[in-house]
């Protein structure tokens, strides 16, 4: 691979990376998504790539499912078009950069995590000053002002008044930043042959702590560390004894802020479900917790278990009888309600194939821990629908040359 081509591929990766971070008005724009997909498609075609039959078959099956939705519900939500663009984008991008996905991802997260540290220190020291600096674009460019004064972003760092003492990094919130850090930990451990005393791993871990994210720290305990131990040939009994039991004890009895967050969400799950019949007129939306989101989505899943609802949001328990919108945060249960059993099978099969292939390529074991980690990530964040994560779903749909070139 020439230096010019490698730089081009990295730029293509960065476009999808920041679109996935969803941190400002530019990166969440439909125009940006279409433009990024078009640019990537240009390089896809200019290098002589063609669409694999598997992807064409997928597209035909997807169109058939859309026809079923149209007949059943009488309409197709406009978001369906955006969704297919993401499918298309994820497919062509992974076909271009799959050999260097791990180094691109780990390098980017490492650099941005380092950048976040001085911003985070300033955030803790003088929050108002930090907001004036981080909000320089949003304060001076009207189109960049996405969420008024409670949210500021400067591409490489975000400030969110709902997490004044937490590090959001380059993502839309601390939990979102944590999802990137966790995935970077997986990839870096693979790259460095499972060495913990590695500067990138150390930076990821420190950054993860600064997020104060329940989901992030839980995934490290229950997926990343077992993945590391598995590749160090530690038995499953030892993994259970060393990791699972102490993690539960620490999480619920020593880390107060984690205990309060988890137990509050679990104990209020029925209250969240009660929002369905909330009849107050002065509230436009309600944000659900992880458990509340799961319970509400499961109501939809039971009604349409095979193919789900697709993007037909008005058919789902998205609005109460009074019009109060229920905002979900559980991406896994949302996926389940959207695509049903067929979608869940597709998700699990494609993720498993993807990381089993990388396991053979990089010669590591326990690829299911990465899949498990991704499922845990999506239990707290709806990121399966972003271009970067779409790549994992469409990785199995094209033929590959096993030769790989990367810089560790």
Image (spheres, rainbow, N blue to C red):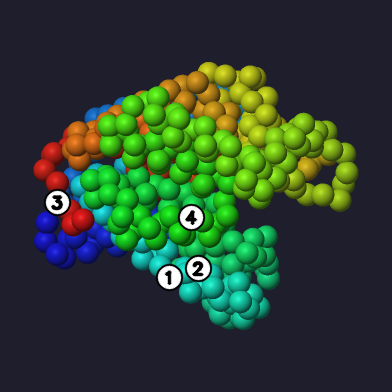
Residue drawn at 58 percent across, 55 percent down? 212
Q: Secondary structure at mark 3?
A: loop
Closer to the N terminus: mark 2 or mark 4?
A: 2
For residue 397, which quarter of the picture? top left
> Is any part of residue 184 visible from this angle?
yes
State the image coordinates of residue 235 (x, y, percent, origin top left).
33, 27
Residue behind mark 1: 115
- Do the residues bearing badges 1 and 2 touch, measured as CB atoms within 8 Å? yes
Closer to the N terminus: mark 4 or mark 3?
A: 4
Q: Secondary structure at mark 1?
A: helix
> Is any part of residue 87 visible from this angle?
no
Residue behind mark 2: 157
Nearest the eye: 57 or 392? 392
Closer to the N terminus: mark 3 or mark 1?
A: 1
The vertical placement of 370 against 32, above or below, is above
Q: CA distance from mark 4 to mark 1?
A: 14 Å
Q: CA distance from mark 1 to mark 2?
A: 8 Å
Q: Residues within 10 Å of mark 4 (few under 14, many from 20)?
A: many
Nearest the eye: 46 or 367? 367
- Do the residues bearing badges 4 and 3 touch, measured as CB atoms within 8 Å? no
Q: CA distance from mark 2 to mark 4?
A: 15 Å
State the image coordinates of residue 343 (x, y, percent, origin top left).
46, 26
Q: CA distance from mark 3 to mark 1?
A: 27 Å
Residue drawn at 31 percent across, 55 percent down? 197
Closer to the N terminus: mark 2 or mark 3?
A: 2
Q: CA distance from mark 2 to mark 3?
A: 31 Å
Closer to the N terminus: mark 4 or mark 1?
A: 1
Residue behind mark 4: 208
Q: CA distance from mark 4 to mark 3?
A: 29 Å
Closer to the N terminus: mark 1 or mark 2?
A: 1
């Amino acid at each position: 691979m020439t230096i010019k081509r490698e730089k081009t591929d990295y730029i293509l990766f960065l476009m999808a990376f920041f679109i996935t971070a969803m941190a400002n008005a530019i990166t969440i724009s439909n125009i940006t998504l279409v433009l990024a997909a078009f640019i990537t498609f240009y390089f896809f075609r200019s290098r002589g790539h063609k669409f694999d039959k598997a992807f064409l078959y997928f597209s035909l099956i997807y169109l058939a499912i859309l026809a079923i939705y149209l007949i059943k519900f009488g309409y197709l939500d406009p978001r369906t078009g955006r969704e297919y663009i993401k499918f298309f984008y994820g497919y062509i991008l992974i076909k271009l950069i799959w050999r260097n996905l791990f180094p691109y991802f780990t390098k980017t997260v490492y650099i941005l995590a380092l950048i976040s540290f001085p911003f985070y220190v300033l955030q803790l020291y003088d929050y108002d000053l930090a907001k004036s600096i981080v909000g320089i674009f949003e304060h001076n460019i009207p189109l960049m002002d996405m969420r008024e004064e409670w949210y500021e972003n400067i591409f490489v760092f975000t400030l969110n008044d709902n997490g004044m003492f937490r590090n959001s990094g380059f993502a839309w919130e601390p939990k979102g930043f944590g999802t990137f850090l966790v995935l970077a930990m997986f990839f870096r451990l693979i790259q460095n042959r499972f060495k913990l005393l590695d500067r990138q791993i150390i930076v990821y871990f420190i950054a993860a702590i600064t997020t104060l994210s329940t989901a992030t720290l839980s995934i490290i305990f229950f997926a990343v560390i077992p993945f590391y131990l598995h590749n160090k040939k530690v038995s499953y009994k030892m993994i259970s004894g060393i990791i699972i039991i102490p993690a539960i004890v620490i999480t619920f009895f020593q880390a107060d802020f984690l205990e309060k967050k988890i137990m509050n969400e679990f104990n209020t799950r029925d209250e969240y479900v009660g929002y369905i019949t909330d009849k107050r007129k002065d509230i436009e939306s309600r944000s659900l917790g992880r458990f509340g989101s799961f319970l509400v989505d499961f109501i939809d899943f039971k009604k349409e278990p095979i193919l789900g609802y697709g993007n037909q949001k008005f058919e789902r328990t998205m609005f109460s009888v009074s019009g109060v919108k229920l905002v979900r945060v559980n991406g896994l249960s949302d996926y389940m309600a959207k695509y049903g059993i067929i979608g869940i099978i597709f998700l699990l099969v494609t993720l498993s194939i993807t990381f089993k292939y990388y396991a053979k390529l990089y010669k590591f074991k326990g690829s299911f821990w990465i899949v498990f980690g991704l499922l845990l990530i999506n239990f707290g964040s709806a990121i399966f629908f972003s271009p970067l994560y779409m790549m994992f779903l469409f990785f199995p749909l094209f033929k590959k040359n096993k030769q790989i070139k990367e810089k560790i």
